[in-house]
Image: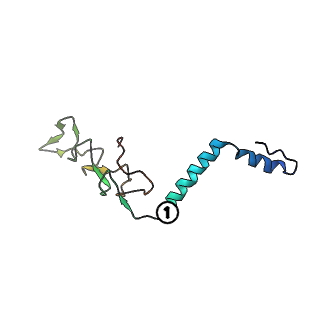
Amino acid sequence: MSFDDSDLDDEVASELSRYSNRELLRRRAERLELVWKVGKRRKPVPCDCCDGSGEKPCSWCNATGAMRIGEHVFCSLETGCKPCPVCNSKGAVKCSHCKGTGFRAGWLEPGCPTAD
């Protein structure tokens, strides 16, 4: 397809030739579809990964809040337990799927990604 018609000025012809690329049109259509989905107001959907709490158990300390390496917990009678450096002794971390909100975006597919 060519837009080299003498009626069109060069600027308009170059702009129209950008849209003759099917891959570019497909990507633009996908983006517009996503923008439309994002713009639709929906009821909040609870996060599937954290069940709407916004937090997940800390996998580093096994939700104990105490620093541990393997099965060894770093506690003593004099100093108490060393705090977990990942969750700061809370035993839970912010859910990475919902970023701690407890809700997932309405346009995302349901389910929890495996790499969390």
Which residue of the protein is positioned furthest toward the left in this rendering? 77
Residue where numbered disc 1 is placed: 40
Crowd band around label 1 with a 10 angstrom C-alpha radius: few (<14), some (14–19), many (20+): few
- Residue 52: image quadrant is bottom left
- Quadrant, the N terminus: top right
Residue in front for this viewpoint, 37 or 67: 37
Residue sitting at x 49%, y 63%? 40
Q: Is 6 on the left-hand or right-hand side of 66?
A: right
Task: Kindly identify the residue that appears in the image at 41 percent across and 50 percent down.
Answer: 109
- Helix, strand or loop at label 1? It is loop
Q: Position of residue 30 (x, y in %)?
A: 56, 49
Residue 107 spot, x, y in % from top left: 45, 55
- Between residues 93 and 33, which one lies in front from this camera angle? 33
Tell me the quadrant of the picture where the C terminus can be found: top left
Vertical placement of residue 87 versus 73, above or below: below
Amino acid type of the residue tagged 1 in the rendering: Lys
Name the quadrant containing residue 100. bottom left
